[in-house]
């Protein structure tokens, strides 16, 4: 996924080279919030009558320092009496490594140059269905351009070719396209992540988000373009710009339900096959070796992973839930019931959707303006919340995803599936991912020298900016309402319990923490940092910022969906899988936390050292709410706590740690049972 941006002018326009260059650069820099893995630019060289593309595995601001870019942009904007355009992207890598320039955007295919924000989920199936088009690279955008050229060869108009091609795609598409043999510039989107600023006369700017153009207005003096407006290109719509006449035409991406359904079904069969394979141990091993890592050391590495299930089964557990004796601050009464059960107040007694419908009435707006922000990880609960907001509340939603470097490709594909299907804009805020991953690596390296269970949450500190950016985006989009998928069953107090914080049985929200406990937590972390100086690194400021973001960011005008509808695992899974082909992981039967790259690592540590993980707390909360039996919960956690090799391997690779070295150290940590 990426930020796309650009500027187009008519032949008659007389804007200075300085104005156009400055405008393009500011739009490019604003797009960096969408990703910094790679970037690229496409311009039309009027002097030599050719399209020029420059790109590389560097952030867009670095690209603009390149002499070649400066020369190309200068040449494009210096020419008199000619149409001008320059457009580009700032990319968050999803399909294809950014180290191979062929996988970077803009993408060139059969005389078409395009940038694409989104993910083509059914990319492999589309190549298989069309053997007469040739795949050359990993990047998913290539198939879109190949399909468009195929349709053009079948005598379709540009608008028809774009519409028909996008309708074959399962996922999200917001794109800008030019053609070496045609006079048209195309902007199109199937989920609404595309905005234009134009003056109806001779100039148009475009960007992935409205906020980018709003910030652009503040940075650039637009008085010389005269009266202008910002327009949202809504889902399943596009515009065509004739470069010779500067004539703008709107067009619709006429939905071809047959094409969509065929792609959806084929993708669903593919997912089902993967899930069937993952349930078979022998085939699963083949899958691990041949499809996931192509790693000749996989068998040896997997053999290192320990799961002392026989010893774990001997742990004394609560007679009502399944929390074991190694759980922080746990106490058992004469009947063997734990203090967590005795202090539990049932929460799965929600209000009604009708009550929520009444509460959101004041937030409804006219003219199809955004009404609600949905924090969207692509996980099962946030997916279900988006479904309910669209189908039950009928609100015009915008989704927001914070990618801090640990969002997996699986999560990204699920985001694309649902947003594409529902036609919902997805705003991605991408951190400086390389820097964030370096922070994680430094903290884990420091932790491995002195493993302390209470410091494990530091591995995930970088994701807490999620709260800050949600608040910021609401302000940018003039949205007051937020609806979250926070699930009270996810309460994992043991993580702070290992830091010496006693449980708060009366807290209002699972993420709430008293001021006194905040100070205790801060003191615990500071003490461990002094004892293990490796923690004192570049990540300290990031961790402090995360702490402030989580606990100090204002939380107003927000509701929790599961306060108004029961959390039912089967209903949720059936809804998101049957309606949206939501994809499950291949290395676990669980549907929880599968889009979080960190979960497999910390759950391995907890399971090995204390005999339980967050799966135990989740299932215990379900028991207390009367959702499942204790026997069923034990059956589930003994399976869910198995080491997840694929996820662990990905995690180590992505942050640059040696799998064997790390696992050997973790395996030597003294156990509490």
Image: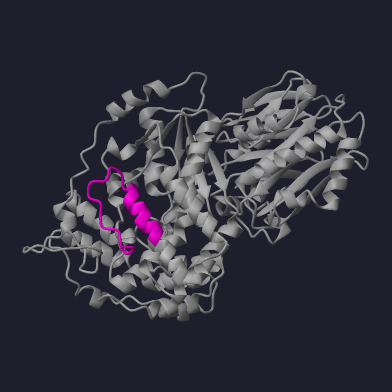
Above or below residue 406? Residue 34 is above
Residue 658 locus on image (x, y percent) = 53, 75
Residue 347 is inside the magenta segment: no
Front one among 421 and 202: 202
With respect to residue 638, does 665 lie above or below?
Answer: below
Residue closest to the eye, 173 or 36: 36
The residue that appears at 32% across and 66% down in the rendered structure is 641
Q: Examine the residues drawn in magenta and state their main secondary structure.
A: loop
Span shown in magenta: 498-523
Q: Residue 277, located in which quarter of the rendered image?
A: bottom left
Does 501 appear in magenta?
A: yes
User: In percent of the image, x 82 and y 39: which residue is there?
Assistant: 181
Q: Is residue 317 left or right of residue 519?
A: left
Furthest-left residue in view?
A: 334
Percent of width and height locating residue 136: 70, 58
Whether residue 283 sits left or right of residue 60 in the image: it is left
Name which residue lies at 77% across and 19% down. 226
Residue 189 shown left or right of residue 524 in the figure: right
Residue 380 image position (x, y, % from top left): 38, 48
- The type of colouring in the image is one colour
Residue 15 appears in the figure: yes
Q: Nearer the viewer, residue 179 or 101?
A: 101
Residue 288 rendering spot, x and y as whole percentages: 47, 70
Q: How many marks?
A: 0
Viewport quadrant of the C terminus = bottom left
Res. 405 visible in picture: no
Does 229 sit left or right of 505 as displayed? right
In which quarter of the view is residue 500 placed? bottom left
């Amino acid at each position: 996924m990426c930020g796309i941006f650009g500027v187009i002018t008519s032949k008659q326009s007389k804007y200075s080279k300085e104005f156009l260059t400055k405008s393009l650069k500011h739009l490019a820099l604003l797009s960096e919030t969408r990703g910094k893995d790679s970037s690229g630019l496409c311009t039309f060289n009027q002097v030599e009558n050719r399209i020029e593309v420059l790109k590389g595995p560097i952030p867009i601001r670095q690209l603009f320092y390149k002499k070649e870019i400066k020369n190309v942009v200068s040449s494009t904007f210096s020419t008199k009496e000619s149409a001008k355009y320059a457009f580009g992207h700032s990319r968050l890598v999803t399909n294809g490594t950014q180290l191979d320039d062929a996988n970077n955007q803009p993408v060139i295919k059969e005389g078409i140059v395009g940038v694409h924000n989104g993910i083509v989920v059914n990319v492999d199936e589309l190549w298989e269905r069309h053997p007469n088009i040739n795949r050359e690279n990993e990047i998913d955008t290539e198939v879109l351009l190949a399909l468009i050229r195929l349709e053009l060869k079948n005598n379709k108009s540009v608008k028809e070719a774009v519409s028909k091609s996008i309708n074959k795609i399962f996922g999200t598409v917001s794109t800008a396209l030019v053609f070496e043999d045609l006079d048209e510039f195309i902007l199109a989107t199937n989920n609404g992540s595309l905005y234009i600023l134009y003056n109806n006369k001779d100039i148009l700017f475009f960007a992935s988000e409205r906020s980018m153009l709003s910030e652009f207005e503040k940075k650039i003096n637009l008085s010389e373009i005269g009266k202008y407006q910002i327009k949202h290109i809504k889902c399943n719509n596009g515009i065509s710009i004739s470069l010779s006449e500067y004539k703008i035409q709107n067009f619709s991406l006429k939905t071809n339900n047959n094409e969509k359904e065929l792609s959806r079904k084929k993708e669903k069969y593919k997912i089902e096959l993967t899930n069937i394979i993952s349930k078979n141990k022998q085939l699963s091993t083949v899958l691990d070796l041949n499809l996931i890592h192509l790693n000749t050391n996989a068998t040896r590495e997997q053999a290192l992973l320990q799961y002392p299930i026989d010893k774990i089964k001997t742990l004394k557990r609560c007679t009502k839930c399944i929390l074991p004796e190694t759980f922080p601050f746990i106490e058992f009464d004469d009947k063997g019931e734990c203090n967590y059960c005795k202090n539990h107040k049932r929460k799965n007694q929600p209000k009604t959707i009708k009550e929520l419908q009444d509460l959101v009435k004041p937030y409804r707006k006219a003219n199809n303006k955004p009404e609600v922000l949905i924090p969207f990880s692509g996980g099962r609960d946030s997916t279900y919340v988006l479904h309910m907001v669209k189908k039950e509340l009928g609100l015009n939603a915008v989704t927001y995803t914070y990618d801090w470097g640990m969002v997996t490709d699986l999560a990204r594909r699920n985001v694309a599936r649902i947003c594409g299907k529902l036609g919902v804009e997805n705003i991605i805020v991408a951190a400086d991912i390389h820097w964030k991953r370096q922070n994680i690596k430094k903290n884990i390296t420091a932790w491995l020298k002195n493993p302390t269970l209470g410091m494990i949450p530091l591995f995930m500190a970088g994701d807490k900016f999620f709260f800050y950016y949600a608040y910021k985006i609401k302000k940018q989009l003039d949205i007051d309402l937020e609806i979250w998928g926070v699930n009270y069953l996810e309460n994992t107090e043991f993580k702070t319990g290992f830091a010496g914080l006693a449980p708060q049985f009366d807290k209002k929200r699972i993420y709430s923490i008293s001021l006194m406990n905040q100070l205790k937590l801060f003191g615990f972390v500071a003490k461990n940092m002094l004892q293990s100086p490796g923690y004192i690194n570049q990540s300290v400021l990031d961790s402090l910022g995360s702490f402030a973001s989580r606990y100090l960011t204002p939380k107003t005008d927000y509701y929790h969906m599961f306060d108004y509808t029961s959390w039912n695992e089967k209903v949720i899974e059936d809804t998101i899988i049957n309606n949206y082909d939501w994809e499950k992981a291949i290395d676990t039967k669980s549907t929880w936390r599968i889009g979080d790259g960190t979960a497999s690592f910390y759950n391995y540590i907890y399971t090995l050292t204390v005999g339980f993980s967050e799966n135990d707390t989740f299932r215990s909360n379900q028991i207390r709410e009367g959702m499942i039996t204790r026997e069923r919960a034990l059956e589930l956690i003994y399976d869910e706590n198995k080491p997840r090799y694929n996820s662990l391997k990905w995690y180590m690779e992505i942050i640059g740690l040696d799998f064997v070295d790390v696992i050997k150290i973790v395996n030597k940590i003294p156990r509490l049972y």
